[in-house]
Image (tube, rainbow, N blue to C red):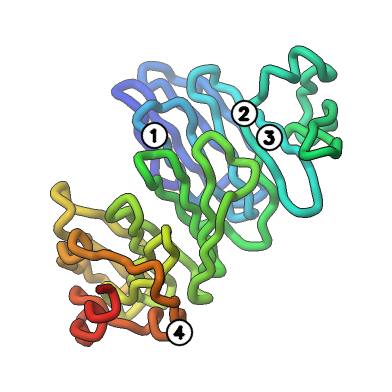
Amino acid sequence: MWPSFPLDSQQEDKETSKMATRLWDMRKKDPIFSRKEMDDYVSKMVTTEAKRYLVCSSGEGTITSINLVSHKLHMQVRCGRETGVWSGPKPASLEQGLASWLPAGSEMVGDCELGHHQHPLTQLQQSEMYDTELTSLCLMRSDSKLLVGSSKGTMFLFNWGQFGYHSDEFPGVKQSINSMIPITENIVVTACEDGVLRATHLFPQRHLGVAGQHQFSVECLDISGDGTFIASSSHDQLIKFWNIRYFEEMNINSRVKSRKREEMKRNLPSSKFQDCSAFFSELA
């Protein structure tokens, strides 16, 4: 049994090794919702304070979202084109001018216009299939963005409520991202398979450097209530605490060209290896 995810005082959701997502009312014996949409394990689940959608990432490389109000899958539409994909909640125009809203996933339901061209409009029960395991989730920018980590080290950014296809992506080191924790509206720390904690600035995109290290794979991250420390746990049987107060004073100069190779190896003040003076000199 995978860890449960509390929703409120009566409800919780549970991840199972049978690839099913189940919603439970703790006052009842049986689940009030159960659905198996994924052919691999459910890796993480997340929802916002509003608790309208529950989003699940999976080892098969998909995002599945559940409407917690209706206890049904969150249906979305995609306007397909070669250069990109549009996704979002069911638009009112489908009821007004398009064919009926079909229950099966990925069925054509009409056309939509992009520029001067029409494209097939399809409905989706899950996101596009990615060629990597989706291993971790976290909320960014006041819960308006969903950041998804993968087993190949790439992070995908989704608009909350629009889970059909990502709006941006952030290549990283080729190490599985086991866990992520948001530090500020723009900074996230990732825990990776190689035992390294890495900090990334999203807008503008910058690899800030190494925030900490373990000898073995890091599996879990959490942050203190005042945002001063993050805690990490690893297969080395250690829980380590890292002072990350310096992130509050950090300013990124978007006019300075990013140097990815140097950024990935840079050690931040919380790292046990020190090159802090060089780090702050390049952020001015």
Dot 4 corresponds to which residue? 261
Earlier residue among tags 4 and 1: 1
Q: Amino acid at mark 4?
A: Arg
State which quadrant residue 100 falls in: top right
**Residue at left offset 54%, top offset 56%:** 156
Task: Kindly indicate whether the residue at mark 4 contacts the one at mark 3 (C-beta within 8 angstroms).
Answer: no
Earlier residue among tags 3 and 1: 1
Task: Kindly indicate whether the residue at mark 2 contacts the one at mark 4 (C-beta within 8 angstroms).
Answer: no
Q: Residues within 10 Å of mark 3 (few under 14, many from 20)?
A: many
Question: Rounded to the nearest whole Å, what is the CA distance between mark 3 and mark 4?
Answer: 38 Å
Dot 3 corresponds to which residue? 125
Dot 2 corresponds to which residue? 89
Dot 1 corresponds to which residue? 48
**Residue at left offset 19%, top offset 59%:** 248
Instruction: Looking at the picture, tell me which residue is in the foreground, 151 or 208.
Output: 208
| Element class at badge 3 | loop
**Residue at left offset 33%, top offset 59%:** 187
Q: Position of residue 54 (x, y in %)?
A: 48, 34
Earlier residue among tags 3 and 4: 3
Earlier residue among tags 2 and 1: 1
Foreground label between 2 and 1: 2
Instruction: Looking at the picture, tell me which residue is in the foreground, 261 or 108.
Output: 261
Question: Rounded to the nearest whole Å, what is the CA distance between mark 4 and mark 2?
Answer: 39 Å
Foreground label between 3 and 2: 2
Count the marks: how many? 4
Q: Position of residue 137 (x, y in %)?
A: 45, 50
